[in-house]
Image (cartoon, rainbow, N blue to C red):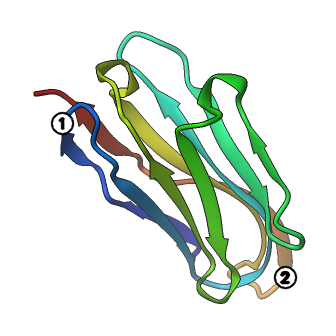
Amino acid sequence: QVQLVEAGGGLVQPGGSPRLSCAASGSILSINAMGWYRQAPGKERELVATIIFSDGSINYADSMKGRFTISRDNAKNAVYLQMDSLKPEDTATYYCNAKVYFRDHDNWPQAGDLWGKGTLVTVSS
């Protein structure tokens, strides 16, 4: 079984700088890319940023550039999101995504598009 586990959400004051983490576990063979998405109440899920594991190439949604920084740790199969100068409108559930190859129950390699359960970040005083 492969899964993503996120951490780092919670209540943050405006202007705060929390850091989210996400680690992939299980029979992971390789990770192509990991990323962060978010979904605010009443809105659709939107891209925050993605990172390619092989070369570190990064893609940010235009609206996320400047205050959000994505990084990775290949050895830990982990991705991080540093969020700075948070605003109330950044309140959302943040989801981790990973595009991976893994071994299934029959030990066959499979491609997978994994999602974490999400971590809620509430920006409020």
Q: Name which residue lies at 34% across and 48% down.
A: 17
Indicate the position of residue 125 as horizontal and vertical percent values: 10, 27
Q: Amino acid at mark 2?
A: Trp
> Nearest the camera: 88 or 101?
88
Instruction: Give the alpha-carbon distance from disc 1 to disc 2, as whole Å.
Output: 46 Å
Q: Name which residue lies at 65% across and 70% down.
A: 72
Q: Amino acid at mark 1?
A: Gln
Q: Name which residue lies at 28% across and 35% down.
A: 15
Name above or below for residue 18 compared with residue 15: below
> Nearest the camera: 10 or 105?
10
Secondary element under disc 2, as helix, strand or loop, is loop
Find disc 1 in the rendering and name its residue: 13
Indicate the position of residue 50 as horizontal and vertical percent values: 72, 49
Q: Quadrant of residue 29?
A: bottom right
In the image, is 123 to the left or to the right of 37? Answer: left
Quarter that holds the N terminus? bottom right
Residue 94, numbered label: none
Q: Residue furthest top?
A: 42
Label 2 packing within 10 angstroms: few (<14), some (14-19), many (20+): few
In the image, is 15 to the left or to the right of 109? Answer: left
Instruction: Judge depth for marks 1 and 2 and give the one in front.
Output: 1
- Closer to the chain start, of discs 1 and 2, is 1
Find disc 2 in the rendering and name its residue: 108
Secondary element under disc 1, as helix, strand or loop, is loop
In the image, is 111 to the left or to the right of 61? Answer: right
Q: Quadrant of residue 60?
A: top right
> Nearest the camera: 104 or 53?
53
How many circles with numbers are drawn on the protein?
2
